[in-house]
Amino acid sequence: MPLASYQTSVPVVVDDAKCIADKGCTVCVDVCPLDVLRISDMTNKAYMAYDECWYCMPCEADCPTGAVTVNIPYLLR
Amino acid sequence: MALDQIVDGLSEVSCDVLVIGGGTAGPMAALKAKLKNPKANVVLLEKANVKRSGAISMGMDGLNNAVIPGYATPEQYTKEITIANDGIVDQKAVYKYAQNCYGIIEELDSFGIRFLKNENGDYAVKKVHHIGTYVLPMPNGETVKKALYRQLRRARILISNRYMATRLLKSADGRIAGAISVNTRTAEMLVIKAKAVILCMGAAGRLGLPTSGYMFGTYENAANSGDGYSMAYHAGAALANLECYQINPLIKDYNGPACAYVAGPFGAFTANNEGSRFIECDYWSGQMMLEFYNELLSGKGPVFLQLKHLHPDTISEIESTLHKVERPTRGLFQQGRGVDYRNDSIEMHISEIGFCSGHSASGVFVDDNARTTVPGLYAAGDMASVPHNYMLGAFTNGAVAGIDAMEFADSHDFADFDAADVARERDRVMAPTRREDGIPPNQVEYKTRRLVNDYLQPPKVTRKYELGMRRLAEARQDMQEHMIARNAHELLRALEVQSIMDCADMAVHASLYREESRWGLYHWRTDFPEKDNEKWFCHTLLSKQNGRMTSEKRAVEPYVVPIADDEKDLYDKQRIRATA
């Protein structure tokens, strides 16, 4: 069966200007309980790669530069 | 390298005690095991990262079951939990918890976790339960995980993050020999030989499907997919009273606690649409949930947590706790909805179903030493059968497990396992990665959990359960023959679906076996609507025997703390009576 991708707006937003993943930081990726964050090969910044969020907040709370924001996912706003 | 690319690999390590799960019970078990024998190797294996894993990822607002001298006695607590759990309790483990938990509170205090004290310096314990007083707020509850992590580092516990355990290994004579795990980012497999294994893998919280549209918008940390229940089952361990589901009263849509345990002691209460109280007590019991369910269906819903009648300073105090710990996005959610606790009540609903002894009684069967029915295998926390044990129970029973497991490891050598078991497990784990074409794990999971909601959610109807069983078998066949995983992250999800499917099957089997109604909404069978103490005043133990799911009765151990006849039904009287 062929697969199609499914569009979804993700709740975790990273401010590229503040993110220091390009300098080797991986804190948000390390702490996420659901392991949904990754560092982009293109921008070298953190982003939400999988929409499997529990909106729990370690990524935002532990980010050393305040680059990560957890929003309430759209469907339950 | 492409995202989460699959690497083919298999290695083997060994340790004295292996603790699986680094949330609440796990770190305490690992710590106590290591302190018991500092020369021994203790490995703490975690699917996520110990720094932020488990139910208390963002901390906890308080202890819900603190037995503190001067406020409550172990006898009183044991009695309360026995009544709240409809009598089906082996009191020895509950009593031992009640005796040990004060020592654990003092130990947590020494780790830097503070508990609320009054002006005299005594613990400021609050009343939420029906009879006794056991709730102790934690003013810096957001620091719990950090404090635990410091202790683990200091004790030199070996931590392996991002490894998901998939199966336990046993020797020919049935003793525990270790576990098989898989790296969640590379799919490399790791066999860990161990003399004793402690399972601290949390609730089965991804069983029912939340109505929000998000599969991971569960009440429990969504990483708690019931892997421990599934592993214990396949290792032949007995699981107790799985039909006693966990179902919680939560903030509608947000699906997190409202939270009456925090706000109740200040005067907040659960109200119906008329603003009236309808339950005597906000403590989460099956009987209370049944009244909640009845109220929602009666035309007097929605149900709310009401605190707008409180003084603004009190509301600010409650707000600062609720919006800081456990589920801190609660504040953001309420803000988005335009809900201000000063003017608005909090709309509530009933959660999806799950297994969790932390709030109810469904768990891997353990005795008062946290031993399962498999020699050398232990369980603690939300997945072990000590009822209503919450966070403090996870810490306290985790400590018991750690000490006993190290004693076991000190007196036993490694058990031998069959290499063919590892080869077979490797084939099972990797199968979804070897298919070119098929169904992705998220669709198998959605379908399974939708079936759980459609057929398994109480009230439990025999005919619905029989249909559910058939449909789940079809979904299982799809899972086994057609599920695909295109990278290591998808493989993690594919393995979790298999745990979820096992838990769904166990929920069906256990619920059909107990032919009575008990624990309020948790096990309300419409075909057997009455409590039947003559036939069913017993535990039910589910286990895998000769490859088949089997259930049997087990007598409740004689009580240590006697319960008078007129006390037995105190939790059945939850509904507020109309006064003339």
Image: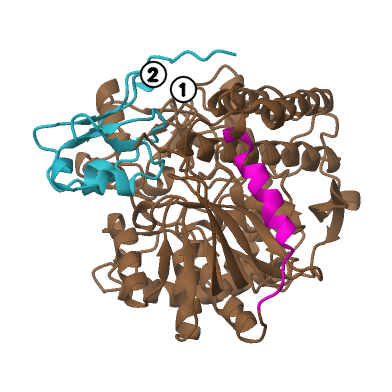
Give the position of the N terminus of chain B as an image quadrant: top left
Residue B145 image label: none
Q: Residues within 10 Å of mark 2 (few under 14, many from 20)?
A: few
Kindly identify the residue that appears in the image at 70 percent across and 40 percent down.
B502
Residue B234 % position (x, y):
73, 52
Q: Position of residue B41 (x, y in %)?
A: 49, 77
Kindly tell me whether residue B20 is visible in this rendering.
Answer: yes
In the picture, measured across the screen, residue B198 lies left or right of residue B537, that is left
Query: In the image, residue B527 lies at what x, y percent?
Result: 85, 29
Count of numbered circles in the view: 2
Q: Nearer the viewer, residue B346 or B392?
A: B392
Image mark 1: chain: B
Question: Which residue does the numbered mark 2 point to in the structure image?
Answer: A75
Locate the C terminus of chain B by quadrant: top right
**Side (left or right) of B188 relative to A24:** right
Q: Which residues are magenta?
A: B414-433
> Which residue is identified by label 1?
B212
Q: Give the farthest residue toward the right.
A: B535
Identify which residue is drawn at 60% across, 22% down: B439
What residue type is disc 1 on? Ser
- The answer to whether residue B286 shows anywhere in this view is no
Q: Is residue B521 on the magenta stretch? A: no
Q: Colour of chain A?
A: cyan
Same subunit, labels 1 and 2: the answer reads no
Q: Nearer the viewer, residue B78 or B336?
A: B336
Chain identifier, colour brown: B
Residues marked 1 and 2 touching at CB (< 8 Å): yes
Q: Secondary structure at mark 1?
A: loop
Q: Is residue B371 above or below residue B434?
A: below
Mark 2, secondary structure of its residue: helix
